[in-house]
Structure formats: C-alpha cells, structure tokens
Image (cartoon, helix red, strand yellow):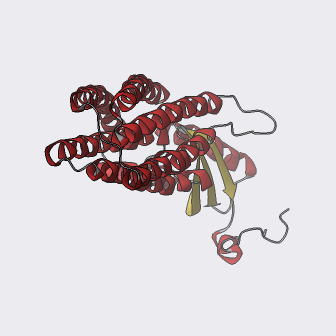
Amino acid sequence: MAASSKKVIYAALAGNTLIAITKFIAAALTGSAAMASEGIHSLVDTGNQGLLLLGLKRAERPADESHPFGYGKEIYFWSFLVAILIFALGAGISIQHGIHSLLHPNPIQDFLINYIVLGLAVLFEGVALTIAVKEFNKARGQFEFLDAIKYGKDPSLFVVLFEDSAAMAGLMVALLGVFLTEITGNVYYDGIASILIGVILAITAIWLAVETKGLLIGESANRHVIAKIRKALDAEPNIEHVNEIATLHMGPAYVIATISADFRDGIGSEEVERSVERLDVQIRALDMRIKRVFIEAQAAAGHLRAGPIPPGETHPGQS
C-alpha cells in the first residue's frame, strides 16, 4: 500500500514540477492571468506532494512509549493539511488573481505559447492522472469508485487523484479561457477562467477536507472486515454471545480490534485464556491490517447495564 502511494505521489510530483516551470515561463511571456493561476495551482500541488511524502515517511516510524500504536495517523494529518493548503493557497490566490485581472485587464501577448504550454501540461498531467487512477483502482478492490473514496483508509491515494483530476479540469478551463480571448478579443475571459480555476480548487479542497477529517478523528474498519471478525467469534465454541466489536484505524494499514464477549459458564480461566489466544491468531490472520486484538470477558447482562460510554466519562470502577 505504501509503495503504491509513493509511486502515485512521485509521478504527480515530477509532472507538477515540470508543469509549474513551463506555466510560469508562459505567464511571464504572455501576461495570461489564467496561465499564472495554473502555475500557482501546479506549484501548490508540487508542495502538497512533498507534504504527503513527509507524512508517509513520518507514519512509518515504529511504535514507542509515547505512541504505543505507532505514528500511522500522521498521514491523516498531513493529508488534511494538504486540503487546507489547496483551499487557502491554490483557490484563494487563483480567485484573487482572476479578480485583479478583471479589474486591471492585461492583453495576452502570445496565444501560441499558451497553447503549447497548456498542451504539454495536459500531456504531463494526463500521465500522472493515469497512474493515479490505475493505482486507485487496484487499491479500491470490490468498492465502487465513490464508495472507495468514502470508505478508503489511505488518503494519500485519493488526495493525489483529486489533485490530478482538479488539475486536468483547470487546464481545460484555462484552454477555454485563452481560446475565447483569442477569438473574441475580450480579455475578460482570461480573468473569468482564472476565477473558475479557483472555484474548482475550492470545491476539491472542501471535499478532501471532509473525507480526511473522519480519518483524522478516527474511523472503524470497513463493514466486511468487522463481519469477518464476528464470524470468527461466532465459530468459537466457548463464546455464548458477542457483546461488542469495536475497531479503529490507527493508520491506513493498522487496525485495532477490541471485543467484548460473554464466555460459557462453567469453563475455567485457563480455558478462557486458550480461547483468547486462539482468537487472537485467527482474527489477525483475517486481514493483514489487524495488528492488535483486545478481548474482554464480560457477561452480556453486565455489558447491557454499562451501555455506551459518553465522551470524557468512564464506567464505575474504571479510571
């Protein structure tokens, strides 16, 4: 999973670096506001890929005393930060640049340079987007496209996919703006295109922020993983009733499973221990992402009396 994420990010990083350089050169030569906005967009994307690589690197650190479950959630934080930067820098600057262009229009000097640069950008971005879509499709498995984004636990894959898709949409808008400016002579189309590019980035950023927020707060494993855990518990002869299965992603490839189960009356503590050991091995084998399993022996009636724990509170006797 990490290898796939890095492959996608490196492809996007290389493409956006080349694109940003060519766009800024073209903007300086032609005076196109849409081209300058596209250059800002590519520059922001390049920085964002660097942040995602930093997040992946920091997430790989081993567990220690202060972080006993590791640093896997680092990638969630950096992905959320990327969404904020797309909104604040990419969208904000593009919209501001477009408004400035409308208030103080500057004629485009050379349309041919714009078309050449945008054509190259479409080529570079198309390669990066193709790689991102390919890796995302491999990672999403049986999920539909939108469900894979909603239930996906590796934000580095869909963040790059969103960025590359927004970049391609922005390039189409920039091309349209330059084309309309050329055939009509109306320089306002260029500024309008810049604002539309900013709107595309803002929508992308908001969607990314919503998707990564849940992961940052803490999401459970997907339903099919929980169903497999329950099936293993139901097959254990020493368990009469499964009270609760609670899972939590501590990173894209790190799941904690906590289980409350009512064991059969009359069995001794040694038999319970053997059942717990057996289940620990079985549940870990169900999915390579399940790293820690905690099983609590608790009577069903006691679990019902306890009920859900409100935030910040504990059950009597807990501390």
Q: Is residue 87 above or below residue 16?
A: below
- Point out residue 56 in the picture as x, y percentages from the top left corner: 57, 31
Query: Which residue is the extreme one toward the bottom?
Result: 305
Q: Quadrant of residue 218?
A: bottom right
Residue drawn at the location 73% of the way across and 46% of the way down: 270
Q: Quadrant of residue 163?
A: top left
Q: Is residue 167 above or below residue 212?
A: above
- Point out residue 40 in the picture as x, y percentages from the top left corner: 45, 38
Drawn side of residue 231 relative to residue 53, left or right: left
- Point out residue 133 in the picture as x, y percentages from the top left corner: 30, 36
287, 216: nearer the viewer: 216
- Residue 84 seen in render: yes
Residue drawn at the location 67% of the way across and 67% of the way down: 299
Residue drawn at the location 30% of the way across and 41% of the way down: 107
Drawn side of residue 27 relative to residue 86, left or right: left
Residue drawn at the location 26% of the way across and 51% of the way down: 189
39, 256: nearer the viewer: 39
136, 194: nearer the viewer: 194
Q: Quadrant of the C terminus?
A: bottom right
- Residue 144 seen in render: no
- Point out residue 276 in the picture as x, y percentages from the top left corner: 64, 46
Please count the marks in the image. Answer: 0
